[in-house]
Image (cartoon, rainbow, N blue to C red):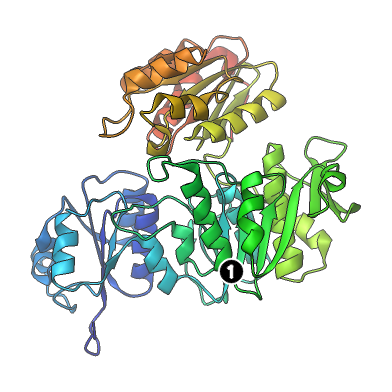
């Protein structure tokens, strides 16, 4: 759509009150566009992003929201914009029957899921895309932090808030972009995984373990999406792939570019000759050692917990040396030692001698298991209670699939509390979810959301208790409210808060 001189371009977001979509709306506002948004809810943290950016918003979906007349009436002023949006975003949780989507198609308004928008408006020639079932958020954040501290000012998109950044999405004039490449997508609205849209010159695969069974009902379908990712990396690019993962071994076979393999523990070098870089713990728990070709090349420190975070650091190190061609290894160590990490990735909300409270994004069984394993190692004297709210892709109704993906998920937790899950067609109910976990031998119970805080207060005696909240964002406020109340107990007065 051509815009007359002086007229602002118009961007409209259908489903604006999501973290990613709100940040994209903000990006277009900062680019000088007139921006509007609609959704069925208006709640933090996305609502705060929209309000602070001064983005016009309306609750509910209606075709009139894509007309200039509606917004002039709502805002009470004349707007120098076209009659219809130049570009529209449709959130992937919408259906093909969404009224605004149908109107946009009928009137030839360019409307797309956000990955297809980022492809044209944020991705740069030196595109670094991080993919994988787990670890991609932290890896993306470390690489972005590294490039920023080196003065390269990359464009970036990270799927979570990061303690070190004001924003989780930024569009700059740099030749570099760093994007977290998610594999989830809507079959109604998109042709495939989001990461296929990001034009990777440099790709990272952290792990491939079958997930999102609602989109990928067979493991082969899930793995094939990563094969497509590998095939679009150009011959002058680079693929950085974790070792010791049979699915990764399979998908990299047709790579046109150079492939670098990495993993934890130098012993892997003698077991897998294709492993180029390894990382392991040093003499102290926070110290790591990086090896190349079996030779120690640098030591560093990190505040991040878990061996999988060592892998994330190592992937960033390979970007530093192989992509940026930087040989100042001490500079890498100095920068990454200051990196604090994404929120909701083993984020400590409270730490006392008797009570530890953690917020985590482990909304899939394998992610939860990894976090619980790490916490069991670091806090062996604490009894762990997991409050678990799964994502939709981790709520299969098929009992065999359920038992397969959850069989080892909570073995490091003393008990599991499940809040009331959303009532959605095609997803397992709360009752059956709890029943299936019990059949797997876990100590699990259902606690309605409104009762969670009071129920958890029963765990706050002077014994050593660790409570971890696993959710996207719905339980985050409950977690913070619980910490505020628990902090007032006498035995929690001597505390270290994060």
Any part of residue 457 in sight: yes
The residue furthest right is 295
Q: Nearer the viewer, residue 63 or 469?
A: 63
Left or right, residue 460 beside residue 333: left
Q: Residue at x 29, y 34 (%)?
A: 426
* Number of marks in the rendered image: 1
Left or right, residue 176 beside residue 325: left
Any part of residue 163 in sight: no
Q: Percent x, y for residue 190?
A: 34, 59
Q: Percent x, y for residue 103?
A: 13, 64
Q: Percent x, y for residue 352?
A: 62, 22
Left or right, residue 10 beside residue 251: left
Circle 1 sits on which residue? 233
Q: Residue at x 33, y 62 (%)?
A: 25
Quadrant of residue 111 in the image? bottom left
Q: Nearer the viewer, residue 7 or 51?
A: 7
Q: Residue at x 67, y 55 (%)?
A: 241
Q: Nearer the viewer, residue 207 or 126?
A: 207
Q: 75 above or below 495?
A: below
Q: Secondary structure at mark 1?
A: loop
For label 1, count other residues whose C-alpha is less than 10 Å away and answer few (under 14), some (14-19) or many (20+): many
Quadrant of residue 216 in the image? top left
Q: Residue at x 51, y 33 (%)?
A: 359
Q: 193 above or below 384?
A: below
Q: 287 above or below 78?
A: above
């Amino acid at each position: 759509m051509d815009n007359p001189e002086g007229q602002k371009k118009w961007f409209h977001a259908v489903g604006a009150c999501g973290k990613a979509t709100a940040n994209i709306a903000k990006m277009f506002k900062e680019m000088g566009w007139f921006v509007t948004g609609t959704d069925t809810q208006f709640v933090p943290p996305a609502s705060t992003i929209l309000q602070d950016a001064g983005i016009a918003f309306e609750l509910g979906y209606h075709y009139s929201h894509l007309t200039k007349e509606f917004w002039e009436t709502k805002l009470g002023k004349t707007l120098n914009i076209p009659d219809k949006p130049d570009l529209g975003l449709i959130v992937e949780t919408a259906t093909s029957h969404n009224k605004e989507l149908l109107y946009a198609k009928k009137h030839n308004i360019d409307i797309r899921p956000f990955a297809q928008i980022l492809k044209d408006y944020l991705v740069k020639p030196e595109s670094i895309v991080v993919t994988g079932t787990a670890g991609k958020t932290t890896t993306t954040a470390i690489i972005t932090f590294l490039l920023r501290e080196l003065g390269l000012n990359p464009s970036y998109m990270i799927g979570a808030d990061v303690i070190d950044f004001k924003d989780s999405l930024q569009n700059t004039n740099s030749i570099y972009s760093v994007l977290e490449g998610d594999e989830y997508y809507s079959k109604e609205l998109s042709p495939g995984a989001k990461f296929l849209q990001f034009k990777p010159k440099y790709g990272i695969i952290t792990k491939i373990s079958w997930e999102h069974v609602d989109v990928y009902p067979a493991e082969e379908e899930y793995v094939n999406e990563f094969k497509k990712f590998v095939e679009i990396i150009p011959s002058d690019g680079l693929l950085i792939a974790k070792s010791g993962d049979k699915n990764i071994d399979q998908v990299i076979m047709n790579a046109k570019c150079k492939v670098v393999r990495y993993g934890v523990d130098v012993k892997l070098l003698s077991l897998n000759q294709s492993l180029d870089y390894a990382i392991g713990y040093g003499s102290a728990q926070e110290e790591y050692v990086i090896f190349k070709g079996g030779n120690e090349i640098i030591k560093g420190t990190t505040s991040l917990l878990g061996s999988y975070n060592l892998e994330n650091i190592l992937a960033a190190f390979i970007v530093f040396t192989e992509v940026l061609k930087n040989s100042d290894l001490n500079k890498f160590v100095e920068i990454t030692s200051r990196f604090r990490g994404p929120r909701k990735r083993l984020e400590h909300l409270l730490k006392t001698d008797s009570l530890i409270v953690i917020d985590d994004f482990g909304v899939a069984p394998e992610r939860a298991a990894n976090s619980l394993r790490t916490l069991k190692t670091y806090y062996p004297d604490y009894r762990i209670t997991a409050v678990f709210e799964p994502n939709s892709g981790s709520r299969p109704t098929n009992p065999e699939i359920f038992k397969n993906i959850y069989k080892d998920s909570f073995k490091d937790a003393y008990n599991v509390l499940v809040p009331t899950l959303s009532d959605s067609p095609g997803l397992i109910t709360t009752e059956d979810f709890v029943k299936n976990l019990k059949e797997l031998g876990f100590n699990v119970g259902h606690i309605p959301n409104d009762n969670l805080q009071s129920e958890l207060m029963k765990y706050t005696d002077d014994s050593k208790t660790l409570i971890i909240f696993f959710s996207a964002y719905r339980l985050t406020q409950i977690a913070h409210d619980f910490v505020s109340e628990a902090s007032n107990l006498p035995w929690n007065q001597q505390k270290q808060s994060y």
